[in-house]
Image (cartoon, grey):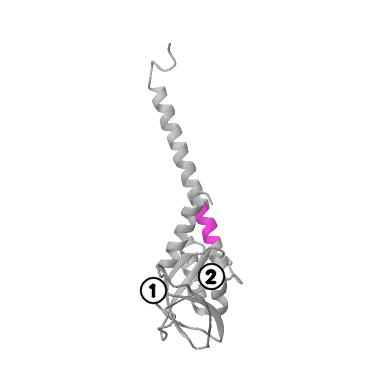
Amino acid sequence: MTEIEEQAADEVLAILQKAATGEAHMLPGPTKLYAHFGEGSTKSGKTVPFNGGTDLLFKSARRGKRDPYILEFELMDSDEWPVIDIPLKNVDRFLPKLAVSLSQVCAKAGGFEDADTAGWQLSSYVDYLAVQTLDRLKREETEREAEALVEQSERYADNDAWGMF
């Protein structure tokens, strides 16, 4: 990833993290999710089965290795596994109300809340937001480079001795 792509991904991550308000959600049915002890823990995590009705608090988001973004949840009634991860691509399936809420946040942040997004999943909103953010950052970089060239040419134009031997 280039530096500008990293910056765009970090901006999208910041939007997702800002949306993590500690809101409670409930898993709709039995499933297996990756559980761990949180960042900085020396203990490793594992995939753990969860029953339907498990209460979760949306705490944070982070960038993943295989999945671009992973949402982190705190289990409300478990001391054994304090944190579980749900990849962004699975949020629609496991937590549809949260997916709708985050989709609205992404659409508002990207300025495309009025666009025709029928049938989009949360990952589509995040991908579109990431592309828009990357395009904006590239435009800003191009504008800065153009301004620097104009400034440089003005410096040479004002110098009467430029090019004289």
**Quarter of the figure with the C terminus:** top left
**Which residue is depicted at the point 47% across and 61% down?**
12
- Label tally: 2
Point out residue 23 in the picture as x, y percentages from the top left corner: 41, 78
Farthest residue, direction top: 165
The mark that comes first in sequence, 1 or 2, is 1
Residue at x-position 44% and y-position 27% = 153
Q: CA distance from mark 1 to mark 2?
A: 17 Å
**From which residue to which does the magenta span run?**
128-134
**Tag shown at residue 21:** 1
Q: Position of residue 43 (x, y in %)?
A: 44, 73
The residue type indicated by label 1 comes to Thr
Residue 84 place in picture, x, y as percent = 47, 76
35 shown above or below 153: below
Q: Which circle, 1 or 2, is nearer the viewer?
A: 2
Residue 47 placement (x, y as % from top left): 54, 77
Residue 101 is a magenta residue: no
Choose between 20 and 55: the one closer to the eye.
55
The quarter of the picture where residue 116 lies is: bottom right
